[in-house]
Image (cartoon, helix red, strand yellow):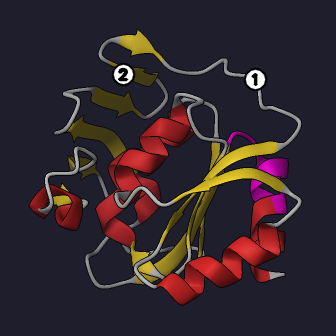
Amino acid sequence: MVVVDPIDGSLNAKRCLPFYCISIAFADGPTVDDVRFGYVLDLGSGEEWVATAGEGATVNGRPLGGVRPKPRLGIVDFEATNATLIADASARLDGHVGRIRVLGALALALCQLADGRLDGVASLKPVTVGRHRAAALIVREAGAHIETRGPAAMPLDLSTRAHVVAARDQPMADQLSGLLWG
């Protein structure tokens, strides 16, 4: 099975903001856990993010991983299209997070996390699960943690929606999830 998101961050692309990408995931089964290869091309910077299950992840051929988690969530990216969701979530993180960004392309934000550029990523509204699976594999293969808040055997399709939370390690992801959703 192949899942392609031709333009993640389409509004950014329409407005000539250079933070959007193409994302391609290859799976050998029908669930999100069956993804074996992921490719994300940052169409703004030209960076290529690649992961193969069990073999690690790279950006432009440089291996990812080994970035030690900071003791605090320094920079967190929210993915949402609603200012009220962003304001409410920001208030819940006040005092726990250094800075908040809203970059506008979930797959690309997850790749930034995999390289240690971000400390956490959260979708504040449910997103289509299949669209970010290439980036989810890159996150896992880089040694970071990602979870989808939904059923255990999430189907790899373009209709199932769920919240996504990712961080440099599981304790940070748990902290971010707990602050946002209790």
Q: Is residue 123 visible?
A: yes
Q: Amino acid at mark 1?
A: Arg
**Quadrant of image for the N terminus:** bottom left
Q: Does residue 90 lie above or below 142 as drawn? A: below
Q: Is residue 1 visible?
A: no
Q: Secondary structure at mark 1?
A: loop
Q: At 24% from the left edge and 38% from the top edge, which residue is drawn?
A: 42
- Tell me residue 133's x, y (percent): 37, 55
Q: Is residue 101 left or right of residue 5?
A: right
Q: Main secondary structure of the magenta part?
A: helix
Q: Is residue 69 left or right of residue 156?
A: right
Which numbered marker is on residue 59? Answer: 2
Residue lying at the far top of the rendered structure: 62
In this rendered view, identify the residue nearer to me: 132 or 154. Answer: 132
- Mark 2 and mark 1 in contact? Answer it, CB < 8 Å: no
Q: Amino acid at mark 2?
A: Val
Q: Does residue 151 lie above or below 114 as drawn? A: below
Figure quadrant of residue 106? bottom left
In this rendered view, identify the residue nearer to me: 11 or 125. Answer: 11
- Tell me residue 55's x, y (percent): 45, 22
Q: Magenta span covers which residues?
A: 168-175
User: Mark 1 — residue?
Assistant: 68
Neighbour tally class for label 1: few under 14, some 14-19, many 20 plus, Cα within 10 Å: few
| Spatial CA span between label 2 and label 1 | 17 Å
In this rendered view, identify the residue nearer to me: 77 or 110. Answer: 77
Q: At 25% from the left edge and 60% from the top edge, which residue is drawn?
A: 9
